[in-house]
Structures are given as C-alpha cells and as structure tokens.
Image (cartoon, grey):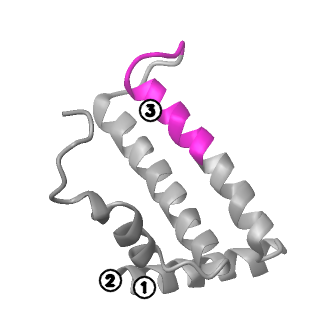
Amino acid sequence: MEINELTNTVKQVAEGYSKKFDVPYDGDWFLLKLQEELGEMTQKYLIMTNRTRRKPESEAEARAALAEEIADTFSYVLLFADHVGVDVEEAVKAKWFKYLGQESAQS
C-alpha cells in the first residue's frame, strides 16, 4: 500500500471514530492524540524491555502491544501531516534522503 493510500484509509477510520464519539476532527485532536500515543508507545516499550514494575505476560504479547502503539502513533502522524498539508513522503525524502551517499560528518 502506498503512503497516500494508507493515509486515506487511516482518514476513513479516524472520520468514523470522530463521528461515533463526537470528537472534533481537527489538528488539535491529531496532535494531542499523537502525544498520547507516543506516551503509550513509550510505556509498552519500557514494559517489553523489563524496565517497569509491570512485567509482560510474554515476549510475544509485549511485542504485539508495542506494535499496536507504533501503529497508533504512525497513524496520527499521517493524520496530522495530512491536516496541515505536509506530504510525508516528500518531507522524508527532503529531510532524510539528502544524506544518502554522504560520508558522516563525524568520520
């Protein structure tokens, strides 16, 4: 699935959620949910790596829980970027790919 198609599918899910729970479909919601999901992703990572009092049921369950939070975080990045008119693919190419083929400045 291409990133634009993925974004459109994520938007469909978010729009349905917004209507069902009467949540404003706007930049504030996307950004605040992104922050929330990032916190949850951090929590699941810390659980998976045994750095909390809470221990995972199993490694597989811990990885699955982390994968879910990564999916949530990524989806809210896509929603926020779309809302503010940023083409994620182009932004990544411009910001990250310019370093391909370059030697590290620290070498």
Helix, strand or loop for disc 3: helix
User: Is the residue marked by circle 1 packed among few (<14), some (14-19), or many (20+) residues within 10 Å?
Assistant: some
Residue shown at the point (64%, 76%) measured from the top left? 14
SS state under label 2:
loop
Are circles 2 and 3 on residues that touch, CB within 8 Å? no
Nearer to the camera, 70 or 102: 102
Q: Earlier in the sequence, mark 3 or mark 1?
A: 1
Q: Which residues are magenta?
A: 38-53
Where residue 62 appears, x then y in whole percent? 38, 34
Frontmost residue, 84 versus 68: 84
Q: Are marks 3 and 1 in contact (CB under 8 Å)?
A: no
Q: Which residue is mark 2?
A: 2
Q: Secondary structure at mark 1?
A: helix
Left or right: 88 as drawn, with respect to 18: left
For disc 3, the marked residue is 45
Tag 3: residue type? Tyr
Q: Residue 27: image x %, image y %? A: 75, 71
Pick the front one: 78 or 88 = 88
Q: Is the residue 54 above or below the residue 65 in the image?
A: above
Report the predominant secondary structure element of the magenta stretch. helix
Of the 4 image quadrants, the one containing the N terminus is bottom left
Distance from disc 3 to disc 1, alpha carbons, whole Å, reads 28 Å
Tag of residue 74: none
Residue at 20%, 60% (x, y): give it: 100
